[in-house]
Image (cartoon, rainbow, N blue to C red):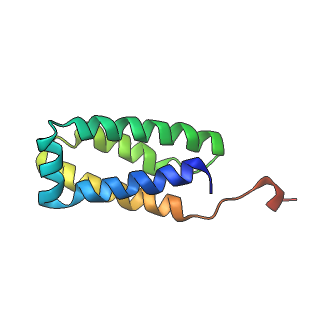
Amino acid sequence: MSRSKILKWVTGALEAILGIPILGATIVIGFLWIPLGVMLILHIVTLVLTKNDGGSTTGSILGIVTSCVAWIPFVGMIMHIISAIFLMIDASKAEIKETDFA
């Protein structure tokens, strides 16, 4: 399993946790919105690694957008859930190796 796929699973799980209504809000507000900055950095790292591996970048880009707008109360919750779904779908896709085409 590639590093980008592992990071997609990790960021997808963290987004799912932040998408839980009361728990996610408590974590984000309790840590003074620092989790949003940490998630932004994780999504950027995941995006770069995914680009290098030639994988789908949809979940990472959506995660970056989520980290930027998640301070808006209900919008943030919905965006976290959508990002988690896309990241986990991207992570569950089979990896295509160059030798598969030969």
Where residue 84 appears, x then y in whole percent? 36, 58
Residue name at image x 34 percent, y 41 percent: 39
Number of numbered tags placed on the structure image: 0
Residue name at image x 57 percent, y 44 percent: 50
Instruction: Give 31 or 95, whichever is nearer the viewer.
Output: 31
Quadrant for residue 23, please give it: bottom left
Quadrant for the C terminus in the image: bottom right
Residue lying at the far right of the rendered structure: 102
Quadrant for residue 22, please give it: bottom left
Where residue 19 appears, x then y in whole percent? 23, 57
Where residue 85 appears, x then y in whole percent? 38, 62
Residue name at image x 63 percent, y 39 percent: 52
Instruction: Give 24 or 89, whichever is nearer the viewer.
Output: 24
Q: Is 5 on the left or on the right of 74, as rendered?
A: right
Q: Is 65 on the left or on the right of 29, as rendered?
A: right
Quadrant for the N terminus in the image: bottom right
Instruction: Give 49 or 89, whichever is nearer the viewer.
Output: 49
Residue name at image x 33 percent, y 53 percent: 14
Where residue 60 appears, x then y in whole percent? 44, 46
Q: Is 69 on the left or on the right of 52, as rendered?
A: left
